Amino acid sequence: MDFLYKLKRSHYSKSLLTALLLIDILIIIVSFRVSVSQITVNNADYLAFYQPFLVITVLLWVITSLFCDVYQTDNLRKISTILVSTLLSSISSGVIIALYVVFLQQHSYPQAFLTIFVGLSVSSLILIKILLFLGYKKYRSLDKNRKRVIIIGYTPTGKNLHNYFVKDQPLGYRFMGFFDDGLKFVNNENDFRGNLSQVKQFCLQEHIDEIYYALPNNITYVKDLAKFADDNYIYFGIVQDAGGLDQMSVETQLYDNGRIPILSPRRDPLKIFYNRQIKRAFDIFFSSAVILFLFPFVLPPIALLIKLDSSGPIFFKQLRSGRNGKPFWCYKFRTMKANNKEANSKQAEKNDSRITKVGQILRKTSLDELPQFFNVFLGDMSVVGPRPHMLKHTEEYSEIIENFKVRHFINSGITGYAQVNGFRGETKDDELMKKRVEYDTWYLENWSLSLDIKIIFQTVWNAVRGEENAY
């Protein structure tokens, strides 16, 4: 079907679709409950006629909203598009509901109920989307949230992309200039920043967030620039056909209603704003639940056992590499002897003499990681993501393992896809670390909220049954 094809091919976020759809369903349910409360309905009629009415209304909204592109992320650029798509979906579902009430349902619904329900649900659906648009616009207009971008190539495609960023821009971009060789910028010389050899220096000086390459294929230069972007946590996009680049695994996104194709060396679902917000909202909810409902019960006995077992603090903190390589203080329950000189350089090994007796139990059950939910709540970590490494190990492995820094494009996690697939704990050789990086990269390229939930369940199951590498 057409809307399913567009859902796969256009600039959509499946997690965004899910979140907005759930919000709309909640609005419909609340509107229904308010409408029912305004009339007198006996229990038998409610079960026989009103509940089916609600179920059918929700199902119709889901179907018509998908057909009418209500949940397309590009809609957030234009308030008129939001209003038109929502109204069109409301009218479509309303017509079908009217046919259902008149021809297929023998019960006579009170006019007051229908009037309140239609007016309240439609106005609420529109109002919420307008507020969402205004909130998004305000958030993206803040200078700290604007992406600083450059375009390599003063070509027709490059100029189209420039117009998209500057004139018909999605909210939140700041265009920093063109780079090209051998071209004279007659009409917009202020936008010219230098030749191709000056790109890297400019990106580092101006803290560029995204690079777009819009020149004819130069595979050597593109590969070099892609590696530079990866190493410096910069998004890299190729604004042209994939011809000549078939040796690279590329992900295509369509900007400006499909007119401008963007090719990236990898998928990055969390580059999409709403995906990041959904993941962050889930992290806040999950970490808050653990901190409020679990931590108060486990902290006292664990703290007491740690103190009775060995001298030293209850908690252990260590600088580790986080998103974009920025170090952060990672917290754990202390599982090793205090004042350990090798704590910041040596991984825990099997039968490690530094580990205390209580520490062995905490590590085996992963309870030592519980304080990291405070890291998650504060935004330094995520519940699910690549495990953070010591700064020394990040520096060492980034020199010998290709694409090692890619795993730092997102927040580190308490658990991760690599860990539930057997790659947790000590990495005895470089091959084990390469496999961990492969799994972490796959997670980054295939993220979804359902995948996070699946990994959490697998982590709990592995902790219950015990893991060989947990020491």
Image (tube, rainbow, N blue to C red):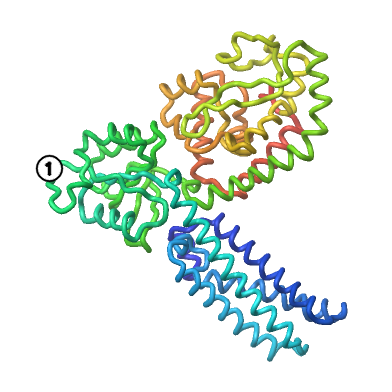
Query: Can the viewer see residue 425?
Result: yes
| Quarter where residue 313 is shown | top right
Query: Between 338 and 128, which is closer to the camera in this rendering?
Result: 128
Horizontal side, residue 69 vs residue 335: left or right: left
Q: Is residue 417 visible?
A: no
Is residue 242 placed above or below 368 in the rendered structure?
below
Relative placement, left or right, of 442 versus 102 is: left
Give the x, y percent position of residue 260. 32, 58
| Quadrant of residue 21 within the rendered picture | bottom right
User: Is 335 left or right of 261, judged from the image as shown?
Assistant: right
Answer few, some or many: residues within 10 Å of disc 1's Cα (few below 14, many 20 plus, some between 14 and 19).
Answer: few
> Residue under circle 1?
182
* Quadrant of residue 25 within the rendered picture: bottom right
- Residue 93 position, x and y percent, is 60, 79
Which residue is pictured at 70% across the width and 72% down the height? Answer: 31
Q: Position of residue 156 (x, y in %)?
A: 21, 56
